[in-house]
Image: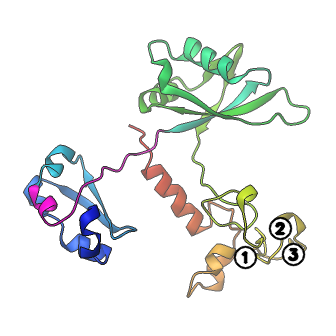
Amino acid sequence: MPDEKNVSKFASSSQTRDALLKPAECGLRVEKITLARNNCVKVTARTPDIDKIKACTGLAEIGLKISEDIKSLPRLIIHGIPADMCPEDIKRDLMAQNLNGFHNDDVKIIYIYPLKQNRSTTSCVIEVSPAIRRALFNRGRIFLHFLACNFVDHVRILQCFRCLAFGHLARDCKAMPSCGHCSEPHESKDCKRKDQPPICCNCRGLSGAATSDIAHSALDAAKCPILGKKIKDKIVNTNYG
């Protein structure tokens, strides 16, 4: 990316890309180059030597700097947790019954789902290190108190259930509502066209989208290419080890 003193020197991400060092100069095995915001370029490479790349004086001389893309830690969702367990109880039993020898700081309780009516168990999202994730999947179950709980990877995309756009939640939404079924300006719960084929409001907004390309819900990750790509990108940017 351009450094603070040379932002105006690179008017676009394309100019930044063209000014990059040659991969051979630092043994870089480039898989993909992506143009990013603020005239930056994202370079995806196999086992890059970050220190060697940062030491390349040619980049600094032309006003560019390197910023390493730090991946997110993996998250898991555990099902069947006793409703009376608080975050401290869950973490204590998780470490004692499943993760002997691992560091306590490598597990973080992210969220406990509210208890549903007439249920005695709930679900919980945790964030762990790649090594802990691997150890838990090798075991197959998570033992908490007297229960053996099922769990899976938790890959969540921030999507508003009011307007169906990305990057914010419904409680913070200032846009007009969009129906998750027919894409008209009303909330999904108020839709009166559920007997008709769905229409994705996000795909409908793409220029040149054919009718067949929008015949799905904006919340259907299996059919919506926009939501599906965001999920794939989230997985790529997570450190699974």
User: Horizontal placement of 99 versus 170: left or right?
Assistant: left
Asked whether the residues under the numbered discs 1 and 3 touch, taking CB atoms below 8 Å apart as contact, a structural biologist would say no
For badge 1, the amino acid type reads Ile
- Residue beneath the point at 82% across and 33% down: 115
- In the rendered image, which residue does mark 2 sit on? 187
Q: Is any part of residue 2 visible from this angle? A: no
Label 1 residue SS: loop
Q: Position of residue 238 (x, y in %)?
A: 45, 45
Q: Position of residue 142 (x, y in %)?
A: 61, 23
- Residue beneath the point at 24% across and 75% down: 9
For badge 3, the amino acid type reads Arg
140, 102: nearer the viewer: 102
Asked whether the residues under the numbered discs 2 and 3 touch, taking CB atoms below 8 Å apart as contact, a structural biologist would say no
Q: CA distance from mark 1 to mark 3?
A: 11 Å
For badge 2, the amino acid type reads Glu
Q: Is residue 24 magenta?
A: no
Camera-side mark, 2 or 1: 2
User: What residue span does the magenta drawing correspond to?
Assistant: 57-73
Residue extending farthest front = 5
84, 224: nearer the viewer: 84
Q: Which mark is residue 193?
A: 3
Residue 225, compared with residue 52, is above or below; it is below
Q: Which mark is residue 199?
A: 1
Image quarter where the C terminus lies is top left
Image quarter where the N terminus lies is bottom left
